[in-house]
Image: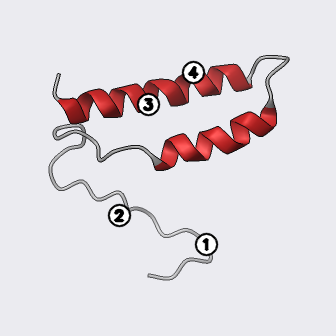
Amino acid sequence: MCAPCQDFARTVGMLADLALYSQTSDADQVFVGVIGPSLAASLPEPPPGLFPPGYDPTDGPQYPGQER
C-alpha cells in the first residue's frame, strides 16, 4: 500500500475508533470533542482512485438559504 494510502487509512481508522469510543457509557466527551475535529483536519488528501474521475465534492444540490 502506498504511503499516502496508509496515512489516509490510518486516520480514517482512528476516526472510526473515536466514534465507537464516543458511544461508550463512560466516554470523555470533552476528549472526543477536541480530538475528533483535530483528526478530521489532519486527513491527508484521499488516495488516487478513491473517488470517480471528475468527482467534485462541492457539486451537489442547492440547499435552502444557499445561493450559487
The crowd level at tag 1 (other Cα within 10 Å; few <14, some 14-19, many 20+) is few
Q: In this view, does 25 lie above or below 5?
A: above
First in sequence, mark 2 or 3: give its number: 3
Amino acid type, callout 4: Asp
In percent of width and height, residue 50 lies at 24, 37
Would you say 7 lies left or right of 20 here?
Answer: left
Amino acid type, callout 1: Pro
Cα distance between the residues tagged 1 and 4: 34 Å
Amino acid type, callout 3: Val
Q: Which residue lies furthest to the right in this view?
A: 26
Residue carrying label 4? 17
Cα distance between the residues tagged 2 and 4: 30 Å
Q: In which quarter of the image is residue 66?
A: bottom right
First in sequence, mark 1 or 3: give its number: 3
Q: Which residue is painted at 61% across and 40% down in the image?
A: 36
Residue carrying label 3? 12
In percent of width and height, residue 23 lies at 74, 22
Cα distance between the residues tagged 2 and 3: 23 Å
Residue carrying label 2? 59
Amino acid type, callout 2: Asp
Would you say 55 lies left or right of 17 here?
Answer: left
Cα distance between the residues tagged 3 and 4: 9 Å
In percent of width and height, residue 55 lies at 24, 54
Specify the quadrant that holds the C terminus. Answer: bottom left
Q: Is mark 3 on a helix, strand or loop?
A: helix
Q: What element carries label 2?
A: loop
Observer-side mark, 2 or 3, equals: 3
First in sequence, mark 3 or 4: give its number: 3
State if disc 4 and disc 3 touch (CB < 8 Å).
no
Specify the quadrant that holds the N terminus. Answer: top left
Residue carrying label 1? 64
State if disc 1 and disc 2 touch (CB < 8 Å).
no
